[in-house]
Amino acid sequence: MTKIICGIQQMGIGVPDVQSVWKWYREHFGVDVRIFEEAAEAPLMTRYTGGVIHSRTATLALSMESGGGFEIWQFTSRPTEKSTEPIILGDFGLYACRIKSRDVKATHAFLTKKGAKVLSEPQQLPNGSFHFLVEDPNGNLFDIVEGSGWFMDTKFEGKTGGVAGSMIGVSSIEKALPLYQTILGYDKIVYDVTDTFDAFNQVPNGNHKVRRVLLQHSEDRKGPFAKLLGPTQIELVQAVERTDAKSIFKNRFWGDWGFIHLCFDVQGMDDLQQECEKLGFPFTVDSGKTFDMGEAGGRFSYIEDPDGTWIEFVETHKVPVMKKLGWYIHLKNKKPGAFLPNWMLKAMRFNRVKN
């Protein structure tokens, strides 16, 4: 099967307490539909957890507005460790999670009213669209951006959807481009600008110059969940005035505090594996066959970008639609690239969790 990148499935977020953080995401971003919730060990991730099998609990939630979800992740066998050093603009890794908005200024007003830590007024990006930065209670940075490709109108007051991409710190944009442009399909450069930016004034090192390259996919995504996941963009950020940039997960485990991984929903995992190996990004983790996550299942794998940022791929085999009725979608033998019908995707809204 030819490899297909269907969209960003989720951003993995390591937290000290899943339920309290998810409640905040429901209230502030409207990410309120639970896909699965599971407590288990993570035996396949020992490469990144000190050679020890650790236990965790995780909840995958999304917004029916459109966009990727959050996989909210918490160690249960050890504390979820926060970085002992401040995360500085230009550090390597998943620096900020992009959240799509129908109306950036209205979202800014909503989050300000809710008492969220809003770090900037709406500012124009180099392409003229508006955005602003906000922190969650754990200090994770979210970039609220103008969205497109909406799936449903849930009437959420904050006018946001789900994950619309990520801002990723890299040591060399040129070294990172083969992965993000070729393998992940973000082949179009929207802008490439080196400057200082007012939106970063309230973040560490935010008054220094950085190079920002915004990438988007020129072809519409396809696959079972593509209409729901929607279009996304990746912004690569490279420091140009500092030589001490470090990995955001330096001396920490996969699963610790912060943005753990960026996960893509895919089809054709075997072909994807061959392409990754050919371009110098071999799978570092591969579940093989179907990995059971209780309410959902599939095959998952990981690669690292040139600076060690974790990129996850999931080939979904089973996902719940209406768990109370025992209704699950089975995708293993579906036609590659085919969309699920809208009515079936919309039925997932019945898994909504109210505050």
Image (tube, rainbow, N blue to C red):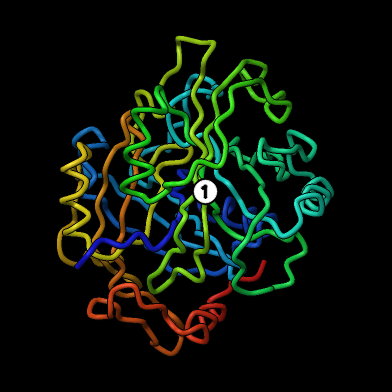
Q: Residue furthest bottom?
A: 325
Q: Is residue 17 left or right of residue 182?
A: right
Q: Is residue 18 left or right of residue 26?
A: left
**x, y (%) of residue 63?**
58, 65
Q: Quadrant of residue 159?
A: bottom right
Q: Dot 1, how many residues are within 10 Å of its Cα: few (below 14), some (14-19), or many (20+)?
A: many
Quadrant assignment for the C terminus? bottom right
Nearest the camera: 179 or 259? 179
Using the rendered image of the protein, determine whether residue 70 is visible from the camera's viewpoint: yes
At a point 51% along the width and 70% down the height, the residue shown is 228
Nearest the camera: 30 or 265? 265
**x, y (%) of residue 260?**
41, 41
At a point 40% along the width and 68% down the height, the residue shown is 222
Using the rendered image of the protein, determine whether residue 16 is visible from the camera's viewpoint: no
Number of callouts: 1
Quadrant assignment for the N terminus? bottom left
**x, y (%) of residue 115?**
79, 44
Say if 271 sits above or below 226 in the image. above
Under tag 1, what secondary structure? strand
Q: Is residue 343 left or right of residue 293?
A: right
Residue to which mark 1 is pinned? 233
At a point 38% along the width and 42% down the height, the residue shown is 180
Instruction: Identify which amino acid the numbered label 1 is placed on.
Output: Gln
Nearest the camera: 206 or 71? 206
At a point 59% along the width and 27% down the height, the residue shown is 193
Say if 127 sits above or below 224 in the image. above
